[in-house]
Amino acid sequence: MSNEFNKEEKVAFDQIIEGFSDSLVLSRNVSKYETDQVMMERTGDIIWRPQPYIAQSFSGTDMTANFYENTQLSVPASINNSQCVPWILSATELRDELQSGRLVDAAKQRLASDIDSAVRTVASLYGSIVVKRTVAATGYDDISLCDTAFNEQGIPDFDRYFALGPRDYNAMAGNLASRYTMTGKPTTAYEKAYLGQVANFETYKMGIAKRLAAAAGGAGITMDTRDAAVNYYVPAATSTAATGEKSNVDNRFQTITVSTTANVAAGDAFVVADMNAVHHITKEDTGSQKTFRVVSVPDGTHLVITPPMVTDQVSTAATAQYQNCVINTKAANSAITFRNTVAAPVNCFWQKDAIELLPGRYAVPSDAGASVLRATTENGLEVIMSKQVDINTLKTKLRVDTRYGVCMKQPEMAGIILFSQT
């Protein structure tokens, strides 16, 4: 076979897979969905994934008036990331096996970083539960507030993960290390800057955290929360076009009307006056303001946000199921207040089912002039290493490829914490 891999290269590829799996930190702590690759090719690499149901209960024995249709919400998930590390080695450079090994190490580190970065970006931009701290990172008190926010809104209390930037993570480890009255964990924190599980979250240190700029939107931005303004959202599984064609609805986002969008930017976090979060199951008012994220700014008076404002202002089976907030005082000019008041790193947290990883595949022929090795990592990602020699120059082209998608399936099961805010 032309350009067949030799034994040393196959061993090197095995080491790529081993190191690749070890390097994947965030992406191994999200849910995974295997897709039919033939179907994905025919659907433009997009598949609609269901969001969790929320059930209702009623008191008494007579349920005559309480039977209702369930509204199954879904979100579009796509395999849209194709990452590759290519390089060339000359016939003389190939004499040095260490040269090849260093490039292999660089390739696996880069691809693993790309995948974890995609998870971090999705969690940082779409996590809708926003915890604001006016002090620097300290430790348990910070993470416990995120645990409280999750509990208040009925987020499952298992498979919870927390990813912190290196400075905030090490600050928390330093706080833990100073607790000499405890045994075990303070020593580990001091020796290895390791936190482990804190306040029901498994914590991880990121190499770098995304930064969120300070909100530049003015303090005078308002929103009409009265019923007539129709700034509330009614979830729907499908929509019907004028031609009668039905299509799925992405219920993660809503377009709201505000007084002005001047200087508002994607990523900004905000609350609305007298609009509180409710427990997703019981629908009881938590007493805490509901937080929202800006996804995009279409024009001067509209914002696309996540999650949508599903209130009790209209009575349907869908709003009864998926209500996520309550307006205690409706007004024509309810104030919008931004939470990200100081530029800071974004530390993100999520429940495992909130984010989904979709492994992709390449159909690369192994008998078309290039040698191909393929393997699958422990979280289902396929990695391909290809090699081809140019007979004119005696240079060998090598590349390592992987393909995947990351989807924020439920923004209300993920959030961020910002430190040193005003």
Image (spheres, grey):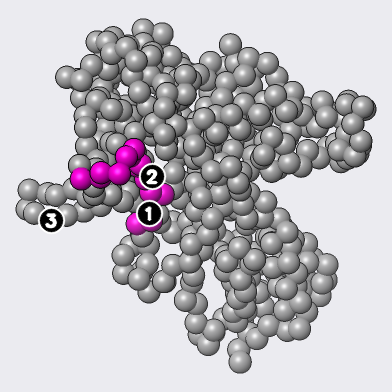
Q: What residue is shown at x 70% (from left), y 24% (from top)?
A: 141
- Residue depth check, mark 2 versus mark 3: number of the one nearer the observer: 2
Q: Is residue 355 left or right of residue 233?
A: right
Q: Is residue 13 left or right of residue 413?
A: right
Q: Are marks 2 and 3 in contact (CB under 8 Å)?
A: no
Mark 1 surroundings within 10 Å by alpha-carbon count, few (fewer than 14), some (14 through 19), many (20 or more): some
Please state the extent of the stretch shown in magenta in the rendering: 48-64
Question: Would residue 75 be seen by someone viewing this image from the given angle?
Answer: no
Q: Which of 347/187 is in front?
A: 187
Which quadrant of the figure contains the N terminus?
A: bottom right
Q: What residue is shown at x 12% (from left), y 49% (from top)?
A: 241
Sequence order check: which comes first, mark 1 or mark 3? 1
Instruction: Give the Cα distance between marks 1 and 2.
Output: 12 Å
Q: Which of 198/253 is in front?
A: 198
Q: Which mark is residue 50?
A: 1
Name the dominant secondary structure of the magenta segment: loop
62 in magenta: yes
- Residue depth check, mark 1 versus mark 2: number of the one nearer the observer: 2
- Image coordinates of residue 340 in percent, x first then y, are 52, 20
Instruction: Give the Cα distance between marks 2 and 3.
Output: 27 Å
Mark 3 surroundings within 10 Å by alpha-carbon count, few (fewer than 14), some (14 through 19), many (20 or more): few
Mark 2 surroundings within 10 Å by alpha-carbon count, few (fewer than 14), some (14 through 19), many (20 or more): some
Which residue in the protein does label 2 denote?
54
Q: Residue furthest left?
A: 243
Instruction: Give the Cα distance between marks 1 and 3.
Output: 21 Å
Which quadrant of the figure contains the C terminus?
A: top right
- Image coordinates of residue 297 in percent, x first then y, are 33, 28
- Image coordinates of residue 272 in percent, x first then y, are 38, 17
Examine the image and state in which quarter residue 23 appears.
bottom right
Which residue in the protein does label 3 denote?
245
Q: Which of 45/65 is in front?
A: 65
Q: Amino acid at mark 1?
A: Pro
